[in-house]
Amino acid sequence: MVSWERSESIILFGPPGAGKGTQSGLISEITGKPQVSTGDMLREAVGEQSDVGNEAKAYMEKGLLVPDSIIIELIRRRLQREDASDGLLFDGFPRTIPQAQALEGLTPVSMVLSLNVPDDIIIGRITGRRTDPDTGEIYHIAHRPPPDDVVDRVIQRTDDTEETVRQRLSTFHSQTAPLESYYREKGILVEIDGAGPMGEVSTLVRDAVNRRTEG
Ligand code: ADP
């Protein structure tokens, strides 16, 4: 038996580099809810040089948040697509209280999974992070090195330098972290220790999602 209405959405919450991108694939598989990453949507818009992309680019490169109005419009439109009818899995959204309040008018949220990872671990994770542009697969130069046939094509995100990571963390603590108590007060926050190796975090995530879905 499911303990939430099928149309309810799930939020995967946590600082940059907490492993949201990695864990969202697993949660999407368990729940069947399509993953929506505002970071990926924005990077796509930047690549296409659309109006949204051109406006978002400077904020992203500095590690600052893109204005709420742009993000809320992206999400509003995404929720209108047919595959959103059973709810979505949000990764990297909402990131401010106004975004969370806007979401309430758009779709019900059943659970906020919060990955907790200390800042010092995050810096090491992000600066070593590399992505395969062909498959979207995420690697780490020390913890999960890309295989030989992929190593020559992996790329580093332009905002994954140490200086920008420190700014992104500071943005997270000042603007995004308050959402944790916001959702705790609503009784839907589930905290997960995200500091361990990927496999261990995946087990914790799987258990948490199954506990909620099996009710
Ligand atoms: P990370 O979680 O590692 O910071 P993302 O890919 O989620 O990476 O986000 C990259 C950048 O995109 C952020 O630093 C920010 O500039 C912008 N961004 C993504 N999602 C949002 C959002 N919900 N609100 C405002 N800005 C966002």
Image: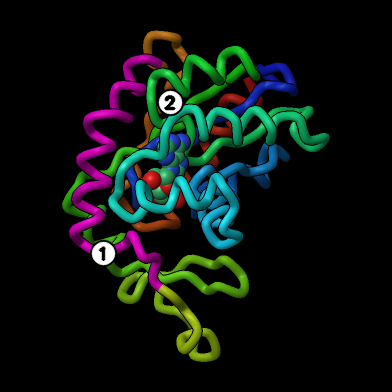
Which amino acid, by three-letter code, is at mark 2?
Answer: Val
Residue nearest the viewer, comparing 19 with 190 = 19
Note whether ligand 1 is within 8 Å of mark 1: no
Q: Residues within 10 Å of mark 2 (few under 14, many from 20)?
A: some
Q: In the rendered image, which quarter is residue 4 located in?
A: top right
Query: Whereabouts is ligand 1, in terms of quadrant?
Result: top left
Going 47% across and 79% down the picture, which residue do you hit? 154
Q: Secondary structure at mark 1?
A: loop
- Is residue 127 placed above or below 164 in the rendered structure? below
Magenta stretch: residue 68 in it? no
Stretch of the chain drawn in magenta: 156-182
- Is residue 46 placed above or below 18 in the rendered structure? below
Gap in angstroms between the C-alphas marked 2 and 1: 30 Å
Return the residue at label 1: 161
Return the residue at label 2: 190
Going 19% across and 47% down the picture, which residue do you hit? 119
